[in-house]
Every structure is written in structure tokens, then in C-alpha cells.
Image: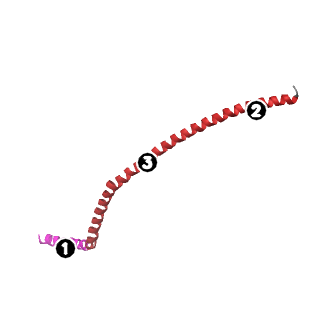
């Protein structure tokens, strides 16, 4: 055999070896691609489930806020507003009441002294 024939034979053997290795690599890559797609579908389904769960929880919270918390807050606000209005109406009169009480104290004290002097 000549060198050229040997080189051609070796080249042919290498080509066959590379083709079989390439075929194995392609099959492995296809298998990995399929596994990756399956895993991604699974993760997508899990994420969709979690998103739906969060949406449901958000709806429940919104309903609780709307039906329970908000009416209570409005009731509390109404009570405070009514009380404030009442205090505001009588706030101006309180200064006069304090002045009257001071005057009453003085009058009672004077009367007490007069009564003690009489007795």
C-alpha cells in the first residue's frame, strides 16, 4: 500500500468514527433538548399555578377589605367626626363655663366666710 492509500484509508476510518461520534452527540443533544422542554413545561405549569394562587389571595384580601375593614373604618370615622363636631360646638362655651366656675368659687368662698362670721 502506498502512503496515499494509507492516508485515504485512515481518513475514511476517521470520517466513519467522527460520523458515529457526531451521531451520538446529536442524539444526546436531542434528548437533552426534550428533557429541557419537559422541565420548562413543568416549571411553566407550576408558575401559572402559583400566579393563580396569588390572584385568588389578592381577590380574597380585596373582598375582606371591601366588605369588612372599609365599613368599620367608615363607622370609626363617623364616630370621631360626630364627636369632633360636638366638641367644636361647645368649645367656645367652655371658656364661659370656666369663668362662671371661677366666679362661683369666689362667691361660695365669700359666703362661707360670712356664714362663719355669723356663727
- Tag nearer the camera, 1 or 3: 3
Q: Residue at x 77, y 31 (%)?
A: 14
**Which residue is tagged 1?**
107
Q: Are marks 2 and 1 in contact (CB under 8 Å)?
A: no
Residue 18 or residue 89, whichever sits in front: 18
Q: Are marks 1 and 3 in contact (CB under 8 Å)?
A: no
**Which residue is tagged 2?**
15
Q: Main secondary structure of the magenta part?
A: helix
**Which residue is tagged 3?**
54
Mark 1–mark 3 Cα distance, whole angstroms, equals 73 Å
Image quarter (top left, top right, bottom left or bottom right) of the C terminus: bottom left
Q: Residue at x 20, y 72 (%)?
A: 104
Measured from the top left, where is residue 100 in percent x and y?
A: 22, 73
Q: Earlier in the sequence, mark 2 or mark 3?
A: 2
What element does badge 1 sit on?
Answer: helix
Which range of residues does the magenta coloring cover? 96-119
Up-down: is 10 above or below 93? above
Count the numbered circles shown. 3
Amino acid at each position: 500500500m502506498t502512503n496515499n492509500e494509507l492516508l485515504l484509508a485512515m481518513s475514511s476510518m476517521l470520517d466513519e468514527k467522527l460520523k458515529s461520534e457526531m451521531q451520538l452527540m446529536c442524539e444526546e443533544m436531542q434528548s437533552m433538548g426534550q428533557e429541557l422542554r419537559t422541565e420548562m413545561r413543568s416549571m411553566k405549569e407550576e408558575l401559572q399555578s402559583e400566579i393563580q394562587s396569588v390572584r385568588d389571595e389578592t381577590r380574597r384580601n380585596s373582598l375582606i377589605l371591601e366588605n369588612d375593614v372599609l365599613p368599620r373604618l367608615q363607622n370609626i370615622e363617623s364616630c370621631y367626626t360626630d364627636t369632633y363636631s360636638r366638641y367644636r360646638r361647645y368649645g367656645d362655651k367652655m371658656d364661659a363655663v370656666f369663668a362662671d366656675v371661677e366666679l362661683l368659687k369666689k362667691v361660695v368662698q365669700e359666703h362661707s366666710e360670712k356664714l362663719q362670721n355669723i356663727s
